[in-house]
Image: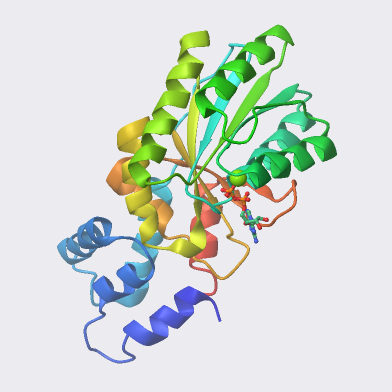
């Protein structure tokens, strides 16, 4: 049974009584502000008691809300993506997936291994780089991530790279250190190319549910994000948080991760996502 069906069974009474939209939408991970806004609009239209009508309206509303924001056309070389997110969210795996996809378009890719917090992190990126034949610029374990980032953009310029993807750490002694470190990495890239990074993408794990909104807010405040990538949607996670993040922070979802292999990356398609969200509803 789809998760939405389960929720419907739980929150929508069979006869006459009020549908508990608020509980239903919160359980679907839409977050409080968006939930309250939707409930108010259902009531305003007088369809809050008609579940089928309400659900139909909600589908259209979510498709509209999640419509991808037009992405700027980047002509700089290299185009630089900064990968951001907490430990284990899927940054390194997504870095590999993005390289795989760029290769299909004939682009030359390079990785910057700015997760110097753990030696294993550099090794993990190196394994992907070897498999995908991508050059990597990395520092020693414990090296300054900002200097690795600077070296990588410098090398990418020198080697005529089309796309530089800078992988970063998701952990530090404390959260504030991590945020400051990311801000410093960003400044280092800017020193070499004023428009870099062209993209600062937050990678979040769909299974972490509600906490995603707090992560997005914090990273956005300090680093300034331009897009969201949600991973691990191949599991039981529902992904309603992409709507909460769009509503509360204005951040568009760009890609979805649906597995651990390089090809398991999907361009975000709002209509498809919403249809799947309500699957079998
Ligand atoms: N099932 C699934 N696993 C994923 C996905 N993306 C990443 N992973 C796994 O999640 C774990 C952490 O990923 P990693 O890229 O190392 O996260 P990082 O710490 O943010 O760099 C690894 O075991 C990955 O294979 C996904 O879309 N689906
Ligand atoms: Mg990593």
Image quarter of residue 219: top left
Q: Nearer the viewer, residue 233 or 2?
A: 233
Is residue 25 among what the camera can see? yes
Query: Which quadrant of the picture is home to ligand 1?
Result: bottom right
Q: Nearer the viewer, residue 123 or 10?
A: 123
Q: Nearer the viewer, residue 73 or 56?
A: 73
Image quarter of residue 15: bottom left
Could you tell whether 104 is left or right of 185 in the image? right
Point out residue 42 in the picture as x, y percentages from the top left corner. Answer: 23, 64
What residue appears at the point 37 percent right and 68 percent down from the top-left corner? 55
Point out residue 211 in the picture as x, y percentages from the top left corner. Answer: 37, 59
- Quadrant location, the N terminus: bottom right
Point out residue 205 in the picture as x, y percentages from the top left corner. Answer: 51, 56
What residue appears at the point 47 percent right and 60 percent down from the top-left corner? 239
48 to 107, vertically: above or below: below
77 to 269, vertically: above or below: above
Q: Residue furthest bottom?
A: 15
Q: How is the image coloured?
A: rainbow
Q: Nearer the viewer, residue 149 or 157?
A: 149
What residue appears at the point 63 percent right and 15 percent down from the top-left corner? 78
250 to 5, vertically: above or below: above
Could you tell whether 93 is left or right of 36 in the image? right
What residue appears at the point 52 percent right and 9 percent down from the top-left corner? 192
**Circle count:** 0
């Amino acid at each position: 049974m789809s998760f939405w069906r389960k929720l419907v069974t739980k929150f929508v009474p069979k006869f006459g009584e009020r549908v508990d939209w608020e509980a239903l939408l919160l359980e679907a991970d839409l977050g409080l502000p968006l939930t309250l806004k939707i409930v108010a609009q259902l009531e305003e239209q007088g369809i809050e008691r008609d579940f089928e009508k309400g659900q139909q309206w909600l589908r259209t509303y979510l498709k509209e809300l999640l419509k991808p924001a037009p992405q700027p056309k980047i002509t700089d070389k290299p185009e630089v993506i900064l990968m951001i997110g907490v430990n284990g969210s899927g940054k390194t795996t997504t870095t590999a997936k993005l390289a795989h996809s760029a290769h299909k378009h004939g682009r030359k890719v390079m990785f910057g291994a700015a997760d110097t917090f753990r030696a294993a992190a550099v090794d993990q990126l190196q394994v992907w780089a070897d498999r995908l034949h991508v050059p990597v610029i990395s520092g020693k374990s414990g090296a300054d991530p900002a200097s690795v980032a600077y070296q990588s953009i410098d090398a990418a310029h020198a080697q005529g790279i089309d796309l530089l993807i800078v992988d970063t750490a998701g952990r530090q002694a404390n959260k504030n250190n991590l945020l400051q470190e990311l801000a410093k990495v960003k400044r280092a890239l800017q020193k070499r190319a004023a428009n870099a990074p062209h993209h600062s993408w937050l990678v979040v794990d769909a299974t972490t549910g509600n906490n995603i909104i707090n992560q997005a807010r914090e990273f956005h405040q300090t680093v300034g994000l331009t897009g969201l990538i949600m991973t691990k949607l191949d599991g039981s996670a529902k992904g309603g948080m992409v709507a909460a993040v769009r509503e509360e922070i204005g951040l568009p979802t760009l890609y979805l991760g649906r597995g651990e292999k390089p090809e398991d990356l999907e361009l975000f398609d709002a209509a498809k996502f919403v249809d799947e969200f309500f699957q079998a509803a």
